[in-house]
Image (spheres, rainbow, N blue to C red):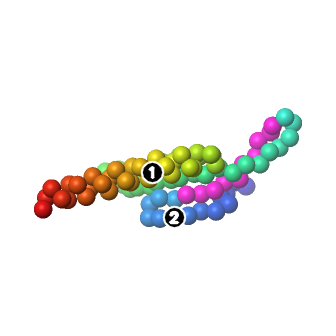
Amino acid sequence: MANRPIKQYRAGNIQGAIWFNEREVKDAIVGFKTVSIRRSWKDKDKDLWREETINLRKQDIPKLMVILNKLQEELLLSDNEEGEDDE
């Protein structure tokens, strides 16, 4: 049976999923959760669907959120500045 995500979320072509994983540590099976983020798009030249996935651990998510917020802030500030120059 294939490993299925515990929970999935989708917004357009972006999908996030939570997975339960197990690993042996010191002769004991330890369970832990990971997250995958997937972006899908259609390659119109080849008429194929493509995707890319990044897998993260729980401790990676706050770091990713900080980086994404900074990137969004920069893009929004840049867009506003460019828009003001056009007026």
Foreground residue among 35 and 87: 87
Residue at the farthest left position: 87
Foreground residue among 41 and 32: 32
Mark 1, Cα crowd under 10 Å, few <14 / some 14-19 / many 20+, is: few
Q: Which residue is mark 2?
A: 10
Query: Disc 1 and disc 2: Cα gap in Å?
Result: 17 Å
Residue 33 lies left or right of residue 68; in this view the side is: right
Instruction: Report the residue at 80% width, 39% height from top.
Output: 24
Q: Is residue 69 above or below residue 28?
A: below
Question: What is the x, y in percent for residue 26?
Answer: 84, 34
Mark 2, Cα crowd under 10 Å, few <14 / some 14-19 / many 20+, is: few
Residue 57 lies left or right of residue 71; in this view the side is: right
Q: From where the camera sits, is residue 20 visible?
A: yes
Quadrant containing the C terminus is bottom left
Name the main secondary structure of what is drawn in magenta. Answer: strand
Disc 2 residue type (three-letter): Arg
Q: From where the camera sits, is residue 50 visible?
A: no
Q: Which residue is mark 1?
A: 68
Question: What is the x, y in percent for residue 8?
Answer: 59, 62
Range shown magenta: 16-25
Mark 2 or mark 1, which is nearer the start of the sequence? 2
Provide the secondary structure element on which disc 1 rests.
Answer: helix
Instruction: Report the residue at 38% width, 54% height from top.
Output: 72
